[in-house]
Amino acid sequence: MSTHELYITPPAEPIWQVPATGAARFSWDYDDGRERLLALYQKGKDKQWDGNKRIDWSLEVDPADPLGTPDEALTLYGTPHWAKMTERDRGELRKHYTSWQFSQFLHGEQGAMVCAARIVESVPDLDAKFYSATQTMDEARHAEIYGRFLHEKIGMLYPVNDNLQGLLGDTLRDSRWDMPYLGMQVLIEGLALAAFGMIRDTTTKPLPKQILAYVMQDEARHVAFGRMALRDYYQQLSDAELREREEFVIEGCYLMRDRLSGVEVLENFGIGKQEAKDLSEHSEYLQLFRKLLFSRIVPCVKDIGLWGPRLQKAYVDMGVLELGDSNLDLLMSQDEEIAEQLDRDRFAAEEEARVAEVAEAIEEGGEAAA
């Protein structure tokens, strides 16, 4: 079945074209480059993996409860709409929410792939080009994996959210070479990491947990790359240039906070847009989710040197300023450890099964000889 047959509503256009701006930059300096960035490039090469082999696609997924997360996380839970729903309706609602979330992950990963390729083209430093090339491959793998999950396990897709598409477009249209870093590596990747992490830590289903944990292991490197490259560059910018970038961050943060709430899902269940917005605004889960969305962004923005009064005031208004003191390195190392522990657990279980199989064969052989 083609992807277009699985969309709840068809995309406005099958191919979205964003005019390219800016210059392609070649560097004739083939010296070693920055040690930290080259070490990250080496790690990017060492950590490549195959989604067909590392992920256990034989695991079953119940489309009526794909994630196993508490129903309290659903916007309609506890409302009169929820009380009127049959169990089948509630299963459809869980399916739609999972489809909407993972569809936005899929579209975002394709955007990340395009942005990483743009960075390879436009960034002036060869060491940054090297790393961005590995990231482009990572993002291709992530898009492949999310697409496979939606096609094979959920059987339903949602079009890209208008506001996510808008932020992607703004990021790609800007001719300044650092903007794909800022828009993608800091804002979109930061928001995605928080969303991935919240589902990874609450799902009771092994397949989505594997997918999210392994993707997050890659994304931890990508955010580290953006921090390194932008921190070095922003130290050279004027106050006016820094303010321009802070305005971009403020606008992007408000856009993602206020508009990524899954209103499209509720509309597909016959709820009007305004009521859907009101229900989302009053969802305790969504309020917590919005705050956690910035757990990766705020410390990163502060770290790269965008911390002017206007930006700080915006974060005060959002109630997330204190997140600037979060230990981003600790969060990233935890992402690494969770993925590696999943590998260890899976390999241990496979080894145990092999040992049991050999022991059973030996026992059967002994009985036959007797």
Image: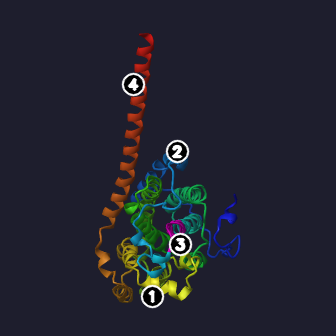
Percent position of residue 211, x then y: 48, 55
Percent position of residue 346, x then y: 41, 44
Q: What predominant SS class does the magenta segment belong to?
A: helix
Q: Estimate how packed mark 3 is, as few (under 14), some (14 to 19) or many (20 or more) residues with alpha carbons within 10 Å.
A: many
Residue assigned mark 4: 359
First of labels 1, 3 by sequence position: 3
User: Is residue 231 in sight in this rendering?
Assistant: no
First of labels 1, 2 by sequence position: 2
* Number of the label disc, if any, that sits on residue 180: 3
Q: Left or right of 304: which side holds 261? A: right
- The amino acid pointed to by label 4 is Ala
Residue contact at pointers 4 and 2, CB within 8 angstroms = no
Of residues 34 and 69, which is closer to you in this image?
69
Q: Which residue is located at x 44 percent, y 22 percent?
A: 361
- The amino acid pointed to by label 1 is Ala
Q: Estimate how packed mark 1 is, as few (under 14), some (14 to 19) or many (20 or more) residues with alpha carbons within 10 Å.
A: few
Q: Left or right of 4: which side holds 79? A: left
